[in-house]
Image: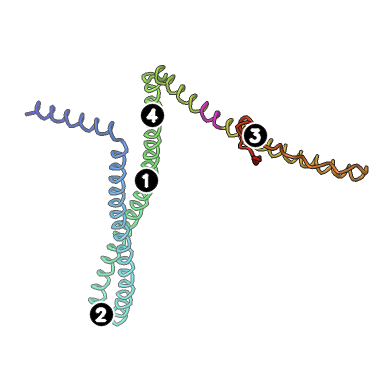
């Protein structure tokens, strides 16, 4: 039975260890929840201790007032010669004072315990927060280190050189597209330039003609006849002998 318990115990600890390794943040959150639960329970017990101290204070105050009242009555009985009544009340006063002394000792001890528990709680909270912050920092460092390790493994295992055949074909296609686009741009530019040159040549001839006419008027030259477009050559009607004669026979 003991061997079986040891096997189960070892298996359980291994399972917990794997869980902590797989998800340390979840384990930390669970520990924080337990810490908060224990802190709440500790504060509750501390509040009970404070309540007991207040009850002791109230009890001591009530007993002291009781002694004052009994002292006045005992004094009155003693003055009246009621010795038996005065003796009984004197004994009751003595017992009440003993109870007050006991309650005061208990009150002092309770207050000292409350102060010690409060200091212990503060130390416990401070240490717990420091440990939680330290574990959070270690988790972050571990995650960063693991991420860098994965990047290193990727850099050593992944081939960053592209396939030569595929990349060459892609470059050729892109070069062809660039050349075709540049050719279209050149053709369009040449066409626009040709149209501009034709329009400029016509304007130049018109300006030259106007300047020449103005110059002729200033010099008194005869006006330059406007250029006559050449007439079309007459159509060939064949030899003259073949034409019909207009002569009238005598």
Q: CA distance from mark 4 to mark 1?
A: 33 Å
Q: Earlier in the sequence, mark 1 or mark 2?
A: 2
Q: Nearer the viewer, mark 1 or mark 2?
A: 1
- Residue receiving disc 2: 82
Q: Earlier in the sequence, mark 4 or mark 1?
A: 1
Q: Residues within 10 Å of mark 1 (few under 14, many from 20)?
A: some
Q: Which residues are magenta?
A: 179-184
**In what quadrant of the picture does the C terminus appear?**
top right
Q: Nearer the viewer, mark 4 or mark 2?
A: 4
Regarding mark 2 in the picture, which secondary structure is present there? loop
- Residue receiving disc 3: 194
Q: Residue at horizontal 36%, vertical 40%?
A: 132
Q: Is residue 182 magenta?
A: yes
Q: CA distance from mark 1 to mark 2?
A: 63 Å
Residue 172, how many percent across, how many down? 46, 21
Q: Nearer the viewer, mark 4 or mark 1?
A: 4
Q: Nearer the viewer, mark 1 or mark 3?
A: 3
Q: Which mark is residue 147?
A: 4
Q: Residues within 10 Å of mark 3 (few under 14, many from 20)?
A: few
- Residue receiving disc 1: 125
Q: In terms of depth relative to the viewer, which is nearer, 248 or 9?
A: 248
């Amino acid at each position: 039975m003991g061997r079986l318990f040891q096997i189960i115990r070892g298996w359980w600890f291994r399972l917990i260890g794997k869980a902590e390794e797989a998800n340390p943040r979840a384990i930390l959150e669970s520990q924080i929840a337990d810490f908060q639960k224990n802190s709440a329970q500790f504060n509750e017990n501390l509040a009970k201790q404070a309540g007991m101290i207040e009850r002791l204070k109230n009890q001591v105050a009530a007993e002291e007032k009781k002694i004052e009242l009994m002292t006045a009555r005992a004094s009155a009985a003693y003055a009246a010669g009621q010795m038996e009544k005065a003796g009984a009340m004197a004994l009751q006063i003595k017992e009440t004072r003993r109870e007050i002394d006991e309650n005061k000792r208990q009150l002092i001890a309770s207050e000292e315990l409350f102060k010690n528990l409060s200091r212990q709680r503060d130390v416990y909270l401070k240490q717990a927060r420091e440990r939680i912050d330290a574990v959070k920092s270690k988790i972050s460092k571990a995650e960063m280190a693991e991420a860098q390790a994965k990047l290193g493994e990727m850099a050593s295992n992944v081939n960053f050189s592209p396939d030569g055949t595929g990349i060459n074909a892609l470059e050729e296609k892109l070069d062809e597209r660039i050349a075709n686009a540049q050719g279209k741009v050149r053709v369009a530019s040449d066409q626009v330039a040709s149209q501009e040159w034709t329009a400029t040549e016509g304007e130049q001839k018109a300006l030259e003609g106007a300047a020449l006419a103005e110059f002729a008027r200033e010099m008194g030259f005869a006006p330059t006849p406007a250029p006559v477009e050449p007439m079309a050559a007459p159509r060939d009607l064949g030899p003259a002998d073949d034409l019909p004669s207009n002569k009238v026979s005598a």
